[in-house]
Structure formats: C-alpha cells, structure tokens
C-alpha cells in the first residue's frame, strides 16, 4: 500500500466518522421532535387538546410504512397479535341463523376468521382505531380504512360519545365495454351502533347525506379522558425503534471502518515510513515476520469487542416497554445477563396487558352480535399462557382423582394435550386402569424428602415403606 492509497483510505474513514456524528445528531433531534410533536395544546375543532384526526391519520400512515420495514416493530406487532388471537376466540352456542351470519364468507373475511383477527388487531397497533361498516339489510360487514374516516359528530354534552362518523372515499365506476375507469368522490355520514336517537336519524350533516341503512362500528384504544380518537400502540415505540435501528446500522458501519486497518506502523521519518510501508505491503504467508528499522513500531489494532452492539439494548428495552412486551422475547435474545427466570417474570405483565386487550375485543364482538340479533353475546377466550404438557397432565390427573371431571372429559383433554391420534370412541374399561390396583397408587407425583424435616405429604419418602408394609 503506497502513501497515496493510505491517505485516501484515511480520508474516507474520516469522512465516514463525520457522517456517523451527523447521523447521531440528526437521530437525537428526530427523537426529540417526534416526542414533542402532537402533545402540545393544539385546540382541535372539538375543543379538546391532543391529537387531531388529521394528525392521527398522518401519524398512522407513517407508522404503517415503518412497521412494514422495521424488524423490531414488525416483531412487536406480531407478538401482540399472537398473544391476543393466537388461540382463537369462540362465540358460544348460537342459533342457526346467527351461525350462518358468522360463517358468511364476507363476514369471515372482515371479522371472524383468523386472518381477519390478525389484520384488525394490527389496525390498533398502527392506527389506534378500527372501523367496520355493517349493512342493516344484508347483515354483511365491510372493513373501512382509517384513511377514509374524515369526521365525527359527538354528543353536545359529552365529547367522548360519537353519534355519526363520516366516510370520504372515491367510488370506482368501471365501464366494461370501453374498459374506462372513473372515480366519483363520496362523502357520507353513518350512525354508529352505540347511538339510538329518540326520533329519527338526521338526514344531512354539513349538507352531506346521512345513510341510516348502514351502521358504523368503531373501536378505539389508548384513549385519555375527554379524547375522541385512540392512539396507536406503536406511537411511543416509534422513535426508539428508529434509534435502535440507526444504532445497529452505525455500529456495523463503524466495525466495517475499523476492519480496514489491521496494523498500525509508527515511524519518526518520512523515508522510514515509505520503506516500512513497502516492506509490510509485500505479500507473505501466514505467520511471517515483519522486520522494521530503528525508530519504527508495528502493533496490531484492537479489533475484538472494539464496538459492542449489546450496549444498544436499552434502546430496544424502550421499544419493548412501549409495546408492553418482554425485551427478551422481542429481540429473541436473552442478552449477556438474561435467563429463563427473568423472561418468565417479565412475561406476567405482558399476559395481563394482552388480557386487557382481549376484553376490548370482547365488547366489540358483543356489539356486533347484538346487532346481528344473537340471543346471547357469549365471547370466550382460551388461556393465553399454555402450560407445559407435564404440568397440565398433573393437573388433569388431580382433577380426575378428585372427581372434578368425568372420565371422558379427562380422556379428551389428555388426547388433546399429548396430541395422540384418537383410535377409539370410548375410554378404556376401568379394570384396565393402572391406578386402581391394590397398591392404591396415584398418578400425581408426590413431593420427596427435602430438607431437615422432610415432606409434609403422606406420600413422603420417609413414610413410603410404612404405607406399603404397615406394622400391626
């Protein structure tokens, strides 16, 4: 490597380091600006402080775009959705008419299928609200994007209670013979399902028609008192996800810059530097010796752990805190000091948070079922946390021993837990039960002797022999 090449590489590295400093400065400024934006008293047309509908729509558009490309936000969205809808939801024993409405392909695609549930919960994550337009005649549902919601009319005495919601969209009209497409701008107000006027619905609002043949269902999350609209789940996590993403990119770029130089050669004279550079640059095999003259020092540059990307973990922790999930699960990495116990401890608040979101969806489903005319609005969720098979088997065996469940219920639960193919329609005879012999054994594992005083159970090791061979 000659002197000119060395200087060029050094200048490139200097310029790249300058770029890194500017990047960190702009990143910090973006975080501060994003945190401050929208939280000042803005004075909306409803007379409330906070985000306006227009600001929320713009923020939601940005969040949707970032979530698609940012791995940590995408992971956070998938985690929350899987916690909430990962094991499905059931609606009780409904009459055939309601079952037909639930199983309607259009309604399945919009609300009741697994795919629809994932899509709808992502709306809470990126938009903070979710809207469905229902036809009162056909009982079919239609998902409405947040971008098409442009206004709301609230109760004169209660700014939180919505009566009408306006939808603005371009209706597509296709002329099939000529294959010409035309767009017709539409502005229509729809009454919401929670508004039941004493008389008739309004005919027009702001000289725009009101369509009472359809009903608008809405769901809002993360609201404050007095606010009309919800706030996206990802909003507080967005600046920190950006910071963590930039930290990893800049750290990788710095590692690449440091990898350009493996050795450092110090010399006191210009001629010595030229001679040494030519000597060191000569190709040689592994394990060769570098011979330098007087006044020259050759040393290797530190490369191991020169940039520790783990130091950016607090940024990821801020994202996890904002999304109410565990940072260990979010990063799929326990970190240097992580452990299973830590992950389990952090997971308990996550489960409670997801159960709260399930309660929000329960109320939404009940409103839809009530509108469909369902006699009961039962919404049941399986447990979010799945017990290990061993613990679940112990619990089932204990329930069977205490006559809390029937034999057929026990058998069905065991088959489901162990994922055993069902080869018979009935349970085996009780005579074949291995736990009904003379030894009066139990499928419940007993606690053994531990500590100075042993177990307090009747099946402790120190009492086992006496139980099996009693002394008269």
Image (cartoon, rainbow, N blue to C red):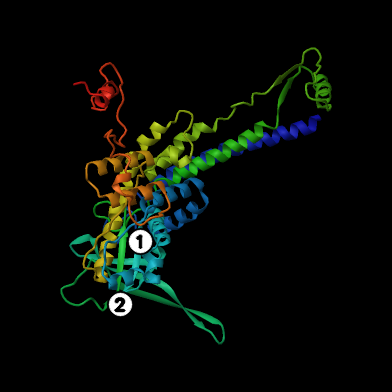
Q: Which residue is mark 2?
A: 211
Q: Residue at x 41, y 51 (%)?
A: 82
Q: Secondary structure at mark 2?
A: loop
Which label number is shown at residue 130? Answer: 1
Query: Quadrant of the rendered structure where residue 264 is?
Result: top right
Residue furthest bottom as drawn: 177
Q: Tell me if residue 375 can be seen.
A: yes
Residue 184 or residue 347, whichever sits in front: 347
Residue 321 or residue 385, whichever sits in front: 385
In the rendered view, does 121 fall on the left or right side of 280? left
Residue 415 x, y percent position in the rendering: 37, 50
Residue 342 x, y percent position in the rendering: 39, 32
Residue 444 or residue 279, whichever sits in front: 444
Q: Residue at x 43, y 52 (%)?
A: 421
Q: Sequence-wise, which precedes: disc 1 or disc 2?
A: 1
Within 10 Å of disc 2 (Cα), the crowding (few <14, some 14-19, many 20+) is: some
How much space separates mark 1 and mark 2, taking CA atoms? 20 Å
């Amino acid at each position: 490597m000659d002197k000119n090449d060395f200087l060029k590489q050094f200048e490139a590295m200097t310029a790249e380091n300058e770029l890194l400093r500017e990047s960190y400065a702009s990143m910090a400024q973006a975080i501060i600006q994003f945190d401050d934006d929208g939280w000042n008293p803005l004075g909306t047309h409803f007379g409330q402080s906070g985000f306006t509908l227009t600001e929320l729509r713009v923020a939601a558009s940005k969040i949707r775009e970032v979530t698609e490309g940012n791995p940590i936000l995408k992971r956070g969205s998938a985690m929350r959705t899987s916690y909430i809808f990962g094991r499905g939801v059931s609606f009780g024993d409904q009459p055939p008419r309601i079952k037909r409405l639930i199983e309607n392909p259009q309604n399945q695609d919009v609300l009741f299928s697994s795919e629809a549930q994932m899509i709808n919960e992502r709306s809470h994550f990126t938009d903070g609200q979710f809207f469905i337009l229902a036809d009162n005649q056909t009982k079919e549902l239609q998902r409405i994007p947040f971008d098409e919601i442009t206004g709301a009319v609230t109760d004169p005495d209660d700014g939180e209670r919505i009566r009408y919601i306006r939808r603005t969209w371009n209706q597509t009209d296709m002329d099939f013979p000529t294959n010409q497409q035309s767009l017709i701008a539409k502005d229509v107000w729809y009454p919401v399902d929670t508004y039941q006027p004493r008389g008739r619905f309004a005919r027009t609002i702001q000289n725009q028609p009101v369509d009472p043949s359809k009903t608008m269902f809405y769901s809002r999350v993360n609201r404050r008192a007095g606010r009309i609209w919800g706030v996206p789940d990802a909003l507080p996590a967005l600046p920190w996800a950006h910071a963590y993403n930039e930290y990893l990119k800049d750290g990788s770029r710095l590692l690449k810059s440091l990898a350009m130089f493996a050795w450092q050669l110090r010399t006191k004279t210009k001629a010595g530097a030229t001679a040494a550079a030519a000597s060191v640059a000569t190709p040689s095999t592994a394990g060769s010796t570098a011979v330098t003259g007087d006044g020259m020092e050759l040393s290797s540059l530190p490369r191991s752990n020169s940039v520790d990307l783990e130091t950016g973990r607090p940024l990821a922790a801020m994202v996890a805190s904002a999304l109410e999930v565990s940072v260990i699960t979010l990063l799929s990495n326990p970190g240097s000091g992580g452990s299973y116990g830590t992950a389990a401890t952090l997971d308990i608040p996550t489960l409670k948070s997801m159960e709260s979101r399930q309660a929000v969806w329960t109320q939404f489903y009940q409103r839809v079922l009530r509108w469909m005319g369902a006699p009961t609005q039962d919404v049941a969720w399986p447990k979010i946390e799945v017990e290990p098979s061993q613990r679940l088997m112990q619990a089932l065996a204990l329930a069977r021993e205490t006559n809390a469940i029937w034999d057929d219920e026990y058998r069905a639960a065991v088959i489901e837990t162990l994922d055993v193919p069902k080869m018979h329609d009935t349970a085996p005879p009780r005579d074949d039960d291995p736990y009904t012999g003379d030894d009066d054994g139990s499928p419940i594992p007993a606690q053994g002797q531990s500590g100075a005083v042993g177990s307090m159970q009747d099946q402790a090791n120190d009492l086992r022999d006496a139980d099996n061979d009693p002394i008269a």
